[in-house]
Amino acid sequence: MSATDQPDAPARIDTLDLIRGVAVMGILLMNIVSFAMPEAAYMNPRAFGSRTSIDYFVWAVNFVAVDGKMRGLFSLLFGASMLLVIERAEAKGQEPGRVHGARMAWLFVFGMAHLLLVWWGDILQHYALVGAFAYAFRDAEPRRLVGVAAVLIALQTLLLTGLPVGIHAVEVAIRQPHPLADALQSYRDYARSFGVPDRAYLVADLAGYRGNYPTVFRHRFGEAIASPLQTLLFVGLETLAYMLLGMAALKTGMLAGKWPRAQYRQWAVIGLGVGVICYGGMAWWVWLRGFDMLAVALTAMTLSTPIRPVMIGGWLCLIVLLARPGGALTTRIAAAGRMAFSNYLLTSLIGTTLFYGYGLGWYGQLARAQLYLIVAAVWALMLLWSRAWLARFRFGPLEWVWRSLARWQIQPMRGPAGV
């Protein structure tokens, strides 16, 4: 008997798949830059790959509408889905802690394999680590979940304040008549993430990712092995906050589309309105500053953190409002969301194959705006294959592997996806 055969087992919520589908597709809008260009280009369009005003326009649209919002939406859905799995385990009389622990342990394994063997930008291992902490809040009331999330966002903002402060201090230090070698090295290190990297670094980075697989592996290994700790430091509290907000949104019926439509409209207008105004103002200010790395770090990392949750809520409500149950596009996006794990790793395999030297070797070859022709093609692939796969199989391929490993039992695969 499956979880959904139990009388008290929560039914599958279609809107979760839809929102997750939008998120996993939206994440590629930002990840494509990390596949195709040196790290600093993700934050700073002046660092690499911006040749015309169209490239800067594309950066601005993504900064205002997408950057961090799709990741946050994905994190929010992860928290909600995690709670659903826990509730289903309890409905079946299973030990929820053991079920949750097994899922997070295997997700961490998948994430580390992805991080070390495929792409340095993995988020799965981060979700596994943060998800282990989120389990402690499974029984909390929505009001408490929102309150704790607000505190976590405030703490993350305070923690990230140290980043622009540190950059400012280094900029002051290197303007001295005889700057210390440590100050010069710190400046170069900051520039490699938020500014314009030095030529020697760019040459080495381009050569590293345009090489064969062993060359690429060696080039990214040091950065990849330090990634779990760095990601926890820079976004860990924020990620936990989104997971808790996802739990709260599930418990209040927000994610299931149970709120009055007028309430969704109100939240969408407020969330997206506030977000566009604030992010638009920050983009304009960064442009006026000539994309100097202090302005980039301050806006992209620090000032964005307390605003982002508001805009994520607006996005969530807009998606619910625009959803057309049974519609062709809605059904395909929901299928992509149901296979989000497989589709996320699929984008990494496609991206690294296109851009790294052991594939087509396009790394550093395309302008920023040109990358979105590839995004459109990958989106089309996701929408086509996800629905076709789920018409024949109950789970996505990696979802099936994860489920089977976590339960230590081969799960049935044949047959169309049910609830």
Image: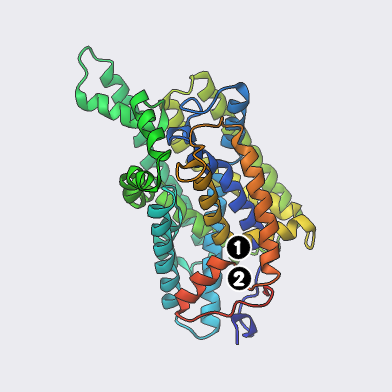
Q: Tag 2's secondary structure?
A: loop
**Residue 202 drawn at (x, y percent):** 39, 29
Q: Are marks 2 and 1 in contact (CB under 8 Å)?
A: yes
Question: Visible in this render: residue 57?
Answer: yes
**Residue 353 drawn at (x, y percent):** 51, 47
Q: Quadrant of residue 205?
A: top left
**Residue 376 drawn at (x, y percent):** 66, 44
Question: Visible in this render: residue 255?
Answer: no
**Residue 372 drawn at (x, y percent):** 62, 38
Q: Where is the C terminus found, in terms of image quarters?
A: bottom right
Give how far apart the Cα atoms at labels 2 and 1 are: 7 Å
Q: Tag 1's secondary structure?
A: loop
The residue furthest top is: 177
Crowd rating for badge 1 (residues with CA inside 10 Å; few <14, some 14–19, many 20+): many
- Return the residue nearer the eye: 417 or 179: 417
- Return the residue nearer the eye: 102 or 357: 357
Numbered circle sitting on residue 395: 2
Q: Residue at x 35, y 31 (%)?
A: 190
Question: Who comes first in sequence, dot 2 or dot 1?
Answer: 1
Q: Residue at x 28, y 15 (%)?
A: 175
- Return the residue nearer the eye: 400 or 9: 400
Q: Is residue 157 above or below residue 336?
A: above
417 left or right, relative to 361: right
Q: Is residue 346 above or below residue 104?
A: above
What amino acid is found at the position of numbered circle 1 in the picture? Met
Residue at the disc numbered 1: 339
Numbered circle sitting on residue 385: none
Q: Quadrant of residue 247?
A: bottom right
